[in-house]
Image (cartoon, helix red, strand yellow):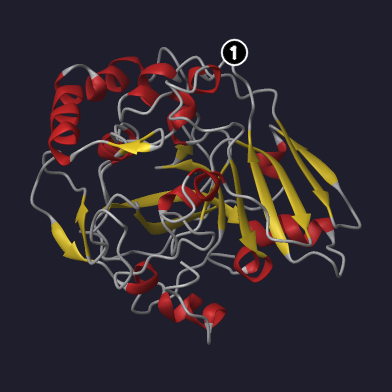
Amino acid sequence: MLIKVHSKSTLKENEVTDENTYINRRSLIKKMGFLGAGSLLASATSSSHAGGLDFFSSKEDTVFARKSLAFKKAQPSSEVLTPEKKVISHNNFYEFGTSKSDPINNAQSFKVNPWKLTVSGEVNKPFTLGYDDLFTRYPIEERIYRLRCVEAWSMVVPWLGFSLSNIIKQADPTSKAKYVAFETLDDPEQMPGQRSRRVGGGIDYPYVEGLRMDEAMNPLTLMSVGLYGKTLPPQNGAPIRLVVPWKYGFKSIKSIVGIKLVEKMPPTTWNILAAKEYGFYANVNPAVDHPRWSQASERRITSGGLFARNRIETLPFNGYGEEVAHLYKNMDLRKHF
């Protein structure tokens, strides 16, 4: 089913972030400390001139081969997509390093086939999806979503995938299933950030995330297997990742190998690392600032340069309030951030 609702959350085409900027993202947060704005600016500027963006454009076809996918195309949108080269070169994927250019530079030999995604826990019908199943088990459709990073930048990306609810329904949850826990591949040989706490940002791997069951079942919650008409590049979470458009980007866990339905709220990586800064819910909320910066506005990454002045107002739930605000009725979103 194609999810395309013409509402306040509908993106305008001129809001879509280009692919290259999305993938070369320089992480603002390193280990348990944080870089200053001046250091970040210098690092980002340096990486953009040191081959971060050019690396992928020159080696995309010869290193990690992406394949075209058959999918149901989204209806015409007024959103401006972020250029593809920026989406695939501006990333936070600490398993491959904490600099924005690290994922694209360090992930091109990443092996995704064979792959196993295990669905287990409080279910009546546990099962495993192999690599080919990711592209054939459920109909693939295009979803144009805003992506809002906790670092106050954003993109608009044409994802390819299917609703997470398809997997959950197939697993037939028991009455005890209240949450859905996710786990990223644990493979230090392929992922240098998992071999070293220094390289990997001080995280205890594997990366883990979680959603409440009603969040997971919401039609907007996507399991993505591609973007811009092709399979995901490794730096974007190949072969399969989560996309939850009304939450900050760190909730959208990449390279998933485990989905487990559980009774109690599962641990999540950034909440473990810094609980006072990264809550379980991570809903985009301009009224609740990060301890070190405002969340009231964001820099939309577009076809301009990395530091183009594209400052826009941040919307509650990233503009998807009509579809998801009811999930949090009567909740204190300052306390449950």
Give the camera-side residue of 332 and 11: 332
Against 46, residue 255 (above or below) is below
- The kind of residue tagged 1 is Glu
Residue at 52% across / 63% down in the picture? 281
Q: Position of residue 322 (x, y in %)?
A: 43, 81
Q: Could you say which quadrant of the image residue 280 lies in?
A: bottom right
Side of 101 relative to 170 (left or right): left
Tell me the residue that label 1 is attached to.
189
Q: How many numbered marks appear? A: 1
Q: Is residue 66 visible?
A: no
Find residue 3 and report its horizontal and vertical position in percent: 51, 67
Q: Quadrant of residue 304?
A: top left
The image shows residue 155, relative to residue 118, as above or below, that is: below
Q: Is residue 121 left or right of residue 65?
A: right
Q: Looking at this view, is 1 or 97 the one in front?
A: 97
Q: In the displayed orientation, state which residue is furthest to the left.
A: 309
Q: Quadrant of the image for the N terminus?
A: bottom right
Q: Is residue 250 visible?
A: yes
SS for callout 1 = loop
Q: Looking at this rendering, what residue extends furthest in the bottom direction?
A: 330
Residue 30 placement (x, y as % from top left): 36, 33
Above-or-below relation of 231 to 327: above
Q: Label 1: how many residues lie within 10 Å, few (<14), some (14-19) or many (20+)?
A: few
Q: Quadrant of residue 92?
A: top left
Position of residue 226 measured from the top left corner of the image (x, y, whole percent): 49, 41
Which residue is depicted at the point 33% across and 78% down? 8
Q: Is residue 263 left or right of residue 139?
A: right
Determine whether 80 is above or below 40 in the image.
below
At a point 57% along the width and 34% down the height, the residue shown is 239
